[in-house]
Amino acid sequence: MNKKDRLKALFAQMKDMNEGKTAFDQTQWDALKAEADKLKGEIEAEAVRDAAVGELNNFLNEPEETPVALRLTDETPRDRNERPFHSLGEQLQAVAALAGRNEAGYPVDQAENRLRAVNAASGVSTSVAGEVGFLVQTDIAAGLRNTAMDTGVLASRVDRMQIGPNSDGMEFYEVEDKDKSQGPWGGSFRVYRKGEKSVMETTIGLNTKPREIRLEDMYGLLFVTNRTLRDTVALTSFINRGFSDNFSWKLDNEIWEGNGSGQCLGIMNSPVLVTVAKETGQAAGTLTVNNILKMFYSMPGRYLPNAAWFVSQVGVQEILPTLTIKDHPVYMPPTGLAGGMYGTLLGRPIIPIEQAPALGSKGDIVLADFKQYLMVEKGGTEMATSIHVKFLTDETAFRFIMRNNGQPWDNAPITTAKGNKKMSPFITLAERA
């Protein structure tokens, strides 16, 4: 009987005695315990000796080392569908290790091979000798991007479209004729019945013009203490929160008032915006029920189901409950029940946003259907790191890059089918100063 089997037999005797299956004898129990402790110590000592001999044997018989760029380890993913990293924190530790800041003790050869596997899966080749930059693992990058978009008050509502790998933008044709008397696409796309064949044959073809939206880089720079860098779980949580909060904030700002030059074109700067004039003699810093009604009826009916009111958090919210039509309120406060997180104005949700200016300014209240706003996105999220930026404060800098851009689908207001009125999916009220 070997030592481990003997130890198992001693354990069985001790267990039976302890559970009352056999008569308990303190002297015999102590003898069994002493023998078991001795055997356990001998087995552990043998394991330590075997490990030392094995390590020395591996060292003496290790083959000549190949260049780092070509070396593969057992930890290298062989299949592109295999996940090289289990979390964002682990991948950041690997990137930091290649940059020379290996606080977490991540094996450098594994870091290089795994990061190369991530880039190879995306068809990207990055030299380790140059800048330490890599793509974020596909499934992690998608989670980051979706979290950033879903967290945004406005970004979560837009019409998102992915761009293919061989393109840096999107070109589409916009209908130039905004007169809706002949249908949603004006005179450029008409629908007929069979009996209207003669009319169809004389119809002029599509009247469209090309529009292009090009991808632009959006950068995020984050400083991480090297103590945090050692903790994969904390690092992942910290990056996820910082990424979602700050990228979504930037996107919301641009969707609202971006200038369209190297960034999204915001609705407040888009020619599609319709601005409802204030009432004659209307006092400064006021909001009337007529303002609300004129805004509401300046949006095409087909956009209203997805529309919401976006209002300033300075002054507008306080005045909304006072608006009535012949003693009937047009505002309904939040119910606190499921689906009642927001109050409603003429049946549409009221969403307070920080981007809207104070009461009386243009843009303090906007009625919008952001499904009529196009956001194009491409590929994964890139990241790079540097140990030099915050060297004196013991911090590592990570840079993240997303590629996207956005603008309203339409470039001008439309004219109603009846009444020749200018309408839009984005309506605001003129300044009341």
Image (tube, rainbow, N blue to C red):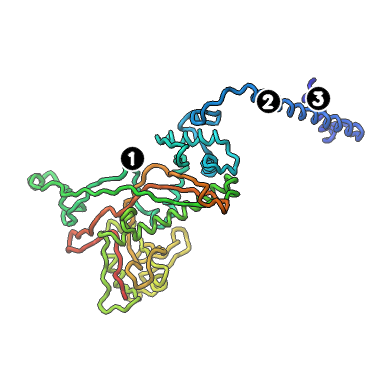
Identify which amino acid the numbered label 3 is placed on.
Answer: Arg
Horizontal side of 12 relative to 51 (left or right) equals right
Query: Among all residues in the image, which is located at the extreme top?
Result: 1
Can residue 305 be seen here? The reply is: no
Q: Could you tell me which residue is drawn at 47 percent across and 52 percent down?
A: 221
Task: Give the residue displayed 68% in from the left and 25% down from the top.
Answer: 56
Give the spatial CA distance, label 2 vs label 3: 30 Å
Q: Tell me the tag on residue 56.
A: 2
Q: Nearer the viewer, residue 328 or 53?
A: 53
Kindly identify the residue that appears in the image at 44 percent across and 65 percent down. Answer: 334
In percent of width and height, residue 253 lies at 38, 59
Residue type indicated by callout 1:
Gly
Q: Amino acid at mark 2?
A: Leu
Q: Is residue 74 left or right of residue 309?
A: right
Q: Which residue is mark 3?
A: 6
* Helix, strand or loop status at disc 2: helix
Q: Quadrant of residue 283?
A: bottom left
